[in-house]
Image: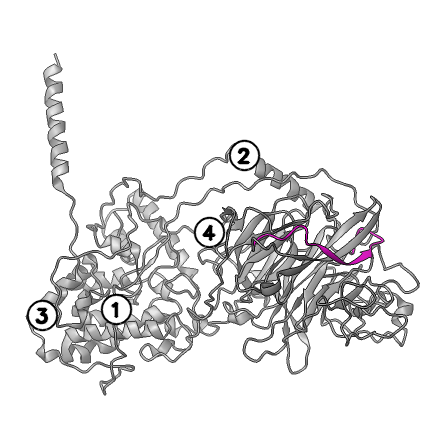
Amino acid sequence: MPRERGPPGEWASAEGQWSSKLSPPHPLRRVFFTIVFLLSLRRALSHPQCLDFQPPFKPPYHLEFCTYYEKFGCCDQKTDNVIAERYWDIMDLLGDEGYELCGDLVKDVLCQECSPYAAHLYDAEDPYTPVRHLPGLCFSYCSNFHTKCHSVVKYLTDSKILQESCEKDGPRFCNLINLPDQDYCYPNVVQNNELYNNLGKVVEDPKGCLQLCLTEVANGLRNPVLMLHSGDGTHRMFVAEQLGFVWVFLRDGSRLEQPFLDMSGDVLTTGWLGDERGFLGLAFHPQYKNNGRFFIYYSILVNSKLEKIRISEMKVSATDMNVADPHSERVLLEIEEPAANHNGGQILFGLDGYLYIFTGDGGKAGDPFGKFGNSQNKSALLGKALRIDVDGSSNNGKPYKIPPDNPFIGQPDARPEVYAYGVRNMWRCSVDRGDPVTRYGRGRIFCGDVGQNRYEEIDIIEKGGNYGWRAKEGFECFDVKLCQNSSLDDILPIHAYGHHVGKSVTGGYVYRGCESPNLNGLYIFGDFMSGRLMALEEDKTSGSWKERNVCMGDTKTCSFPGLINHHHKFIISFAEDEAGELYFLATSYPSAVSPFGTVYKFMDPSRRAPPGKCRSKPLPVKVKGKKVPFIRRELTVLDTSEIPTRPPLKTLKHTTKPPVTTQPTVATTAMSTQKPLNATFSTKLSQTKQKKISLDKTPKPKGKNVSVKKAPKKAAPHQKTILQTKNKVEKDARNLKVSLKGSDKGEKTKPIKQVKPIKPTKSTKLDKLAATSQKSKKNRKGTMKPATSKPKITGPKKPAAWSQKTNKNKKEIKKSLTPKLKLKDPSKNQAKSKKLKENSLIEKKKMP
């Protein structure tokens, strides 16, 4: 049977008493106290967290009651009103004298639910454990509270242990609700400058690296090269594999069994490690919701000899919104590729409605094609940013038009499609959707350009811009003669980094989402070869960009349900969903046939948006085929934490209703609605109210609802195969010297033994209990109660009418607050005992 929350505080103090008064502790006691000590260590790793297991936030509006937490905490206006209403209900029961004596103290206790450290105060930092009845109070504060307000405890909790200890033994009561870590008990927690100085800011390690966390979104993908939304309001995500498959992922995380598009029969790709050819680009028309048009970019092989890249238009099926029409392809442009590498691959629509196409320089090392290379040759389409109008055809028979403001129209030595030039192999570009309030930065196009031997760079694309390759690499000269040419007039990158940091940049996005306000305006990108995540922060006054390294948060920082702090090494691409949240795609083995590609979502664990702010109403998706549910493979931080947490509660039945009481309700009081006195009781708490609670005995779990941590099972044979395969390919990946996007040699790498795709198998799940918050039966009607001139009480106040309430009414209210305990039917046990006695007598008669 589950124990009440709080005893660890008493156990810690009792250990000293036993050691001084009694003989040396029993060995089991030593083990017991070791466990308690480890639990206290876990508490010492506390971080800001709310009772819903999420980071705190800045309330959108002024808090009228718990004003101390109106700048940063865990309460919005709605929760603040609920706490205030509960407070005045209790004051109704105390009368004027009790109000004067205990008003401040009770308010402080109730408002700890709004503290940024609420989860720690209520001992609810993970979903394995229920919420404490009372927040952790420091011993001296608790002693004062008990002396003045011990009669209030029965209105704050229905725990028999807390009520009895409060009446009979004040020190024991304060030990029960104290916390071992004195830095975090109230009021010490609000007086600790170290805890409160940087509240709400992104956590940084000692070297200034921003600590972020991740959630796993999808897995089992074969070199996922891109993910994007269709912009049609459905919030679907489309993930493309290098092999030529495009998959649809729904809002609930499931994947449709039938691919949206299968181009695997036409796409040129191999299983070679780091092969850069394949299905490389996808873009949905800005009016896709109405016209169903989208565009693709992929490698092809003509007559088994000539390699090209092809840009085509296709349409969605007229009968199924989740499937493309395979017969609708219309080729817009084909460009010959002289080598197997540097294939570019990014296509996107700008805010101007035109299609931008980013091509590589043709491959090999140093752009050796022609006198100045393809990139500086404006008559070549390689090494360029092209811009075309796909909403019409030109007079010369091309299936697209040239935008009238393209920069090189009319120049005899330039192709009219060219928008910018001098790029080497831009891998992943994005359009900045702009600041959600000021719209600053809206429409800028950011690209990551893979370097040659020394530098990787990030560029902002401008009309007619020359980005320097092959004259320059990063900020420095590559071809000295070209670099010294006075007519070069190149645009410098906003950032470049050397090959001691990484050797193949993967362009990202400027974060403009809602869920992580601290990240707004950061350009987040990565490196394919080193697996590093990086960020750039803009100085708007000077226009310069400052580098901010991104690290995975440590165990303390990412100890939230569902969060992980690790990812696969090879970062292939970044993505943005329809709401502006940011993702990246990575694999542990960069081969087009290896099924280890995973999609991760960024999360800032130090601050979130207020509840309800980021809600969206996606349009319905008509699904005709089967859905494949998402099964998480990566262990979360809470799963892998070496510091033990309390085991899950035993013999629990998940109920959706609070315990029923047969006590009559009092219609004349505000408490007759049977609302919990302590907010955010979990389902587990309501279940503990139904059972007798004992500190000394914990019966063995029975029945099907037992949930205990078990020793890890041996891997099944099919699981061993996956693990052995993964170990092998990870060993090969460590020896990888070829970049997926920027290899310097034109020669093809030697083919390796292809890894056959492995169908995802169901991963074993850890035995957990997800604690769900149990809300009040009803939400009270009306507004906050008006404030009066009572001393030291801020916020709304209810006019006093306590003198009219009788002692009889108060006793009835007290009874209504305490649910009856459901006792087990003893008749079954008596019948069983009688049967055992009869069997015993029969056995005795049979004996000789």
Q: Which residues are magenta?
A: 322-342
**Which residue, given by chain and number where applicable, does mark 1 sit on?**
142
Q: Earlier in the sequence, mark 1 or mark 4?
A: 1
Q: Give residue 129's position: percent from left, percent from top.
A: 34, 54
Which residue was labeled with disc 2? 718
In the rendered structure, the answer to whether residue 221 lies left or right of residue 387 reads: left
Which-is-in-front pick, marks 2 and 4? 2
Rounded to the nearest angstrom, the CA distance separating label 3 from label 2 is: 67 Å
Choose the circle earlier in sequence order: 4 or 3.
4
- For the residues labelled 4 and 3, the Cα–Cα distance comes to 51 Å
Secondary structure found at label 1: helix
* Dot 1 and dot 4 residues touching (CB under 8 Å): no
Judge by depth and name the residue closer to the eye, 177 or 718: 718
Q: Mark 1 and mark 3 in contact (Cβ < 8 Å)?
A: no
For the C terminus, which image quadrant? top left
The disc placed on residue 641 is 4
Outermost residue to the top = 848
